[in-house]
Image (cartoon, grey):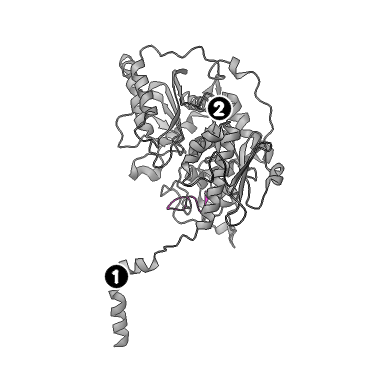
Amino acid sequence: MKRAALLVAIAAVTPAVLSAQQQDTYDYWRPQRDMIRHGQQAVLMCNGLFTGERSLEQVFDQELAFLAQPVGTPRGGDYVVDWDREAVAIGASGGTPIMRAAYREGIGCVIMAPDQTFEDINELPELVMPAPEGNPEQIAWPDGDLVDGIAITPGVDGEALQAASNWAFDRESPEQVTLSLMVVHEGRIIHERYAPGVDVSTKTRTWSTAKSIAVTLIGMLVDEGKLELDAPLGFEWLPEALSPEQDPRNEITLRHVLNMASGLESVDNRGLEYAIGSGMSYWAGASSMTGALSRPLVREPGTVWDYENYDTLLGVYAMKLALGDTQTYAEFPRRRLLDRIGMRNTLLSTDRFGDFILSSQVYTNARDLARFGLLYLNGGVWNGERLISEEWIDFTRTPAPATADTGNFYGGQWWLVPDGRTDVPKTAYSTAGNRGQYVIVVPDHDLVIVRRGLDYGRQGFDRWDLTREVLKAFDRVSDER
């Protein structure tokens, strides 16, 4: 009888009660969040000052507006800017670790570990390579920056194009801050506009637009046969299994990670974006590769779309292994892509171990991103030389199978027009980065649109709405064709 009564009592406990009893109310990750918050500010300030060459006031006003509680003000606070070493330290002794970031030649700012100081800067990676030949100011666009006037293509409605530009800059939401807008039609710049304090040379962070650069470099190795899209990645996963040959992660392919469907545990979502996962390598000095290789498999690869920075970095690690040595790996992006299409203003940053953080940490300007978009618009050919295959571009534009039930909105590290969207061409596709970084390719109109922003708070700038507004200037061109 007593046992039966106990069972009845247990059955009477409702799921809601159990849920309340098991709900955590304390943020156990708070110390790491505080460390990462300091690291974020260190990286953003360092790159804002020494990569973007912006003033301290501009950095606090825009770069750091993304942070809920930045340390200090332009007038001072618990931070140090070492102008000679081109480095920044955030925080004070006691409590949360002081986090430091330092500018390195050819790379941009590198976040240091909590136990490193400015005395350790010379141990950080750098990339010393000669600049491409020629003066970009004397080389015609798109290989250089010499532009013989900006004029509207015949048939394009100039007033409608200006209205689209105003739509991008004059936002109802003060949290959406457009820095630059470029419209390139038939290879020519027909509109270029910058916010006050920004010009053609200003470099800002691409955030996840970097992923589309990553997939381009990876695709070059697939084209050469050095990587296979549907072969297992062949990694030595961490932690090492007692029987590595039986590790279920051995079934993950390059296609899976580039489609954001690796099946590995999610560590960058669900409220933990700035506590664990890639945040530790982005902002706290942890190894990006160790973190990427350490997630367990929780579902069948290819079945569920889950946006993860570490999935991209697994593709980058595959690229590194395929290239064979660290120097070839370090120089590969410039030799095979950036220098060839005139992206002289672009820095691909690394963690302190020399691994590219090509899921986010790239600094560049609007014109370089327009060049990148033109490479895709032109089918992978630049000045008559094929840099990436049409087959690879097709892969990046093909919906990931795991998105079939949710709108077919994502391809291979590029974003696609979702099924429910009918006001822009379905053939358009786009990069996308936090704070509003977009390169939009519209093949039907021979068009590339670049929007750079430093949005904050709710953000929400819609790239497809921008595409719709720009295309209003091309209605007559489409009719004539």
Is residue 351 inside the magenta stretch?
no
Tell which residue pokes out farthest to the bottom in this image. Answer: 1
Q: Can residue 1 be seen in this view?
A: yes
Q: What stretch is highlighted in magenta?
A: 268-278
Residue at the (33%, 18%) spot, across then down: 478
Residue 209 shows which numbered tag? Answer: none
Among the 4 quarters of the image, the one containing residue 336: top right
Task: Please tell me how crowded label 1 is: few (under 14), some (14-19), or many (20+) other residues with Cα within 10 Å.
Answer: few
Q: Distance between the residues labelled 1 and 2?
A: 61 Å
Q: Where is residue 431 in the image (x, y as percent from the top left)?
A: 45, 34
| Residue at which label 1 appears | 14
| Number of disc labels | 2
Q: Main secondary structure of the magenta part?
A: loop
The residue mark sitting in front, 1 or 2, is: 1
Tell which residue pokes out farthest to the front in this image. Answer: 75
> Front-most of 141 and 96?
96
Q: Where is residue 373 in the image (x, y as percent from the top left)?
A: 48, 27
Q: What residue type is labelled 2?
A: Leu
Q: Position of residue 227 (x, y in %)?
A: 57, 40
Q: Is residue 219 visible?
A: no
> Front-most of 358 and 257?
358
Q: What residue type is labelled 1?
A: Thr
> Front-most of 265 and 49?
49
Cβ atoms under marks 1 and 2 closer than 8 Å: no
| Residue at which label 2 appears | 387
Q: Which of marks 1 and 2 is nearer the N terminus?
A: 1
Q: What element carries label 1?
A: loop
Q: What element carries label 2?
A: loop
Residue at the (53%, 35%) spot, across then down: 57
> Where, quadrant-wise, is the C terminus in this rendering?
top left
Residue at the (53%, 26%) spot, across then down: 368
